[in-house]
Image (cartoon, rainbow, N blue to C red):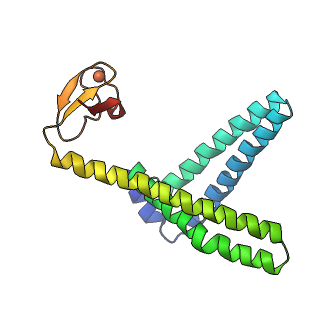
Amino acid sequence: MNNTTTTVASALDGTKTAENLRQAFSKEAEAFAKGSIFASIASDEGNMSAQRTLAEHSDNDKRHAELWLGYLDELGDTFENLAELSALKAASSTNLYPLMAEIADEEGFDEIAEKMRLVAAVKDSQSRMLQSESDRIADAQALYSENPETVWHCHSCGFNVMGNTPPERCPLCSYPQCFFTRG
Ligand SMILES: [Fe+2]
């Protein structure tokens, strides 16, 4: 989240435009998911021209969804994103799907109720996995800050550098931080 995005998001608080951005995001997310699923169906049918068009449009729609989410100031770094998605999936697991499954039971849709409970279990598992990823980042950050004399090795060019974190980019080959491991 940069300062410009945060400023725009503050100005949007409580406006109809903010509400519309949320709706636009939902529509684009739906179009992205449907486009992706329909592209797979086209592929299964051997219609590769339709598959390419659907897949490209689906990717366009994902970008549009990302654009509106950015204005809503909801694009965090990976640590923040993992926490947000973990909470979302935990809520689906403990509230949304169990309640929906109960209603499906009451209305006689036994199979749908069962599938909803199975998906709820997957959401619970996913939430825990995302939380573990988030914990791993927190642990790594704590570890970095405790070890200022760590040697970091660039696997692109072999350069070694000292510090409590690897550099954002390698001073020698300019490859990004993810190419560094402890030397
Ligand atoms: Fe390098």
Give the number of marks.
0
Q: Nearer the viewer, residue 39 or 27?
A: 39
Q: Nearer the viewer, residue 111 or 32?
A: 111
The quarter of the rendering in which ligand 1 is drawn is top left
> Can residue 16 be seen here?
no
Q: Nearer the viewer, residue 132 or 13?
A: 132
Which quadrant of the structure image shows residue 94?
bottom right
> Can residue 59 be seen here?
yes
x then y, percent, for residue 110: 82, 71
Q: Who's the residue at 49% across and 55% down the image? A: 129
x then y, percent, for residue 61: 65, 45
Q: Who's the residue at 24% across and 52% down the image? A: 142
x then y, percent, for residue 175: 34, 26
Farthest residue in the left direction? 149
x then y, percent, for residue 176: 35, 31
Q: Who's the residue at 76% across and 38% down the image? A: 39
Answer with left or right where residue 131 lies relative to residue 180: right
Farthest residue in the bottom direction? 106
Which quadrant of the structure image shows residue 135?
bottom left
Answer with left or right where residue 71 lies relative to residue 179: right
Give the answer, above or below, for where 56 lies relative to 17.
above
Give the answer, above or below, for where 8 lies relative to 41.
below
Q: Quadrant of the C terminus?
A: top left
Q: Who's the residue at 22% across and 45% down the image? A: 144
Q: Nearer the viewer, residue 19 or 28?
A: 28
